[in-house]
Amino acid sequence: MIGKGKSISHTRASMAYGWNQEKDAEIVLKEFLHGDSPAEITKEFKMIQDQNHNCTKNTLSFILSPTIEDGRKLDKDKLQIITKRFIHEMKLGERQAIAFVHKDKEHKHIHLYVNRIDFRGVTYNDSFIGKRCQLAAEKVAEHMGLTTVKQVQFEKELNLKDIRTEIKRRHDLTMAHLKPKSFDAYIKAMETDGVKVIPTINKQNNLQGFRFEFDGHNLKGSEVHRNMSIGNIGKQMGQLEGIKSLKNNNVGVALAGNTVGLGPKLALKLTKFIIKKTIQQGLSY
C-alpha cells in the first residue's frame, strides 16, 4: 500500500474531488462531523480552524492506495479499519476527519481529509509529512496483511532482473549465430528475435547509444549489461562493415538507409579497435 500526504489550503475544492459521485465515491469514515456536502464539512472544519489564524494550510490531505489485487478484497469495513489505523499511526486522533473510497477505476483508493487544527487550536506539525505518511501506510499494510511498497519494489526489481537477463541472452545468441557486421544489421537481427533496438541520436545527428525494448520494458544498453554499451557492441561485431568516413572526417554509420555520425570519443575508440583487429588478422596469415 502506498501513502501520500500533504497540507493544503483549498479544503472545499479538494474535498469536493474526494466526494465526487462520478468516481463512485463512498464515505468510509466520518469523525466529529455532521455535514452532508463538501460545503458543510468545510464550514465545520473552518469553525475549528478559526481558532488559529497563523496556519493557512490548515487541512491535511492523504491518499491511501492498496495494490489492485489487495483492493479487490477490501470491503467498506476493512477500508474503515485501514483508515482508522492510519490515523492512529499518524497520531491524528481526536480530530475532525472524513474519508472516501474511489472505485471508479480498477485501482481502489482512499481519500482522507483531516483538520490540521485540533479542538484546542493547536496546529499539527507537518514536517516530513510525505515520508511519515509512507511509513505509517507501511505499518498499516503489514498489520493488515497487505502488500507493502517494499514488497512491490522487490517484485519489480526481481522482474527487471529477469528482463535484463533475457535481453542479454538474445543479444548473445544474435552475435553468436547471426554475426551482424553493422549496427543496422544488428538492429534487424535483434528485432527478428523479439527485441526492439532503438538508436539514441543527439541534435548533432550523432549516434550515442541504443535502448532495448522488450516485454513492456525500455532500458538503456548499460542498464541491461555493462557489455551492451554501443562501444562494446561495436567491438563484438569485429570489422563493422558499414562504417565510413564523412566529408568532415567524422566517422558515420548507416542506419535504416540514413547515415548518422558517431561521437568523437566513440568514433576514435571503434576506429582504433578496427585498425588493431585488421593488423592482428594480417599477422595471423
Image (tube, helix red, strand yellow):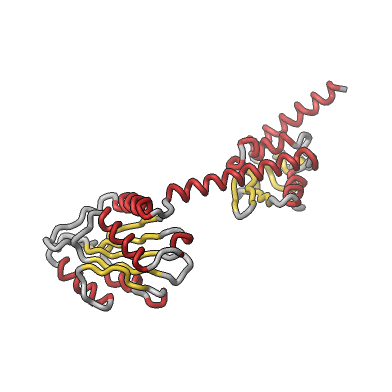
Q: Residue at x 57, y 46 (%)?
A: 160
Which corner quadrant of the image does residue 29 belong to? bottom left
Regarding residue 91, the answer to whether it shows in the image is yes
Does residue 258 appear in this view? Answer: no
Q: Depth check: give the residue in front, 177 or 159.
A: 159
Q: Nearer the viewer, residue 281 or 20?
A: 20
Res. 266 image quadrant:
top right
Q: Is residue 279 above or below residue 27?
A: above
Rendering coords of residue 132 (x, y %) = 30, 50
Q: Where 10 sits versus 138, above or below?
A: below
- The relative height of residue 212 versus residue 49 in the rendered view (above or below) is above
Q: Residue furthest right?
A: 285
Q: Going by the image, does 40 lie left or right of 83? A: left
105 left or right of 237? left
Horizontal side of residue 272 vs 13, given as left or right: right
Which is more toward the observer, 174 or 9?
A: 174
Task: Point out residue 92 in the picture as x, y percentages from the top left corner.
Answer: 23, 57
Whole-percent x and y of residue 123? 17, 57
Which residue occupies 25% across, 50% down?
127
In the rendered view of the protein, which quadrant contains the C terminus?
A: top right
